[in-house]
């Protein structure tokens, strides 16, 4: 009888330790999973006469971990013609979109979460695209030109960040 009581008593002491250890492992595992999830990156490009040659630096590598996942072009003719050579150079199809900015951003982030997406849009559409991504300062169309590239980092947790690159 005494032996049974001793083992029951020891189990009640060890059980909270096992539960605390299990909770610790679950919290560390979930934090590691969230931490290692890559942020999404959206590159917003403006069509120009220079074509995709001046986009080589911001667009980055053709393959590997920094590769572009998708190319979207606004329904405007200038955006479609500018995105076609870039898509051919990167070996990706160009998806021409004719929907509003909010649904375009939702589709791009939903389909390519954690990846890099290029959006080619006219100057007039850029403030609406940036506003659809999140609580970002929207650059005015007057301060943008064809040499401007907007790099928008969309983290899994937190606020998006905007980086403006200009030649």
Image: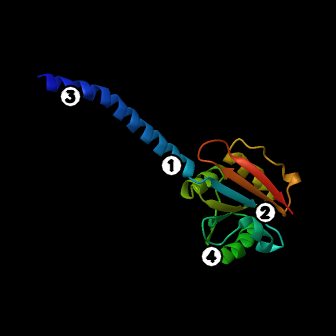
Q: Quadrant of the C terminus?
A: bottom right
User: Where does label 2 land, which residue?
Assistant: 46
- Residue carrying label 3: 7
- Say whether marks 2 and 3 touch (CB < 8 Å): no
The crowd level at tag 4 (other Cα within 10 Å; few <14, some 14-19, many 20+) is few
- Discs 2/3, front: 3
Give the CA separation, mark 3 to mark 4: 67 Å
Q: Earlier in the sequence, mark 1 or mark 4?
A: 1
Q: Is residue 158 above or below residue 44?
A: above
Query: Which residue is located at x 72 percent, y 46 percent?
Result: 131
Q: Secondary structure at mark 3?
A: helix
Q: Which circle, 3 or 4, is nearer the viewer?
A: 3
Mark 4: which secondary structure? Answer: loop
The residues bearing labels 1 and 4 have C-alpha atoms spaced at a distance of: 31 Å
Disc assigned to residue 33: 1
Of the residues tagged 2 and 1, which is closer to the observer?
1
Q: Which residue is mark 4?
A: 91
Residue 39 appears at what percent x and percent y?
Answer: 62, 52
Report the Cα–Cα distance between label 2 and label 3: 73 Å
Look at the numbered discs 4 and 2 and tell me whether their residues touch, using CB distance below 8 Å: no
- Residue 155: numbered disc: none
Q: Is residue 147 visible?
A: yes
């Amino acid at each position: 009888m005494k032996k049974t009581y001793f083992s029951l008593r020891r189990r009640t002491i060890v059980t909270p330790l096992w539960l605390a250890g299990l909770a610790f492992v679950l919290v560390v595992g979930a934090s590691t999973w969230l931490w290692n999830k890559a942020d999404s990156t959206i590159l917003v490009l403006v069509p120009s006469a220079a074509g995709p040659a001046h986009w080589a630096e911001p667009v980055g590598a053709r393959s590997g971990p920094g590769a572009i996942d998708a190319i979207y072009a606004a329904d405007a003719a200038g955006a479609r013609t500018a995105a076609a050579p870039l898509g051919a150079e990167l070996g990706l199809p160009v998806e021409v979109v004719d929907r509003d900015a909010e649904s375009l951003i939702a589709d791009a982030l939903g389909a390519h979460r954690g990846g890099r997406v290029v959006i080619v849009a006219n100057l007039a559409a850029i403030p609406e695209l940036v506003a659809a991504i999140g609580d970002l300062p929207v650059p005015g169309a007057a301060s943008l030109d064809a040499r401007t590239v907007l790099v928008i980092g969309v983290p899994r947790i937190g606020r998006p960040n905007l980086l403006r690159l200009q030649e």
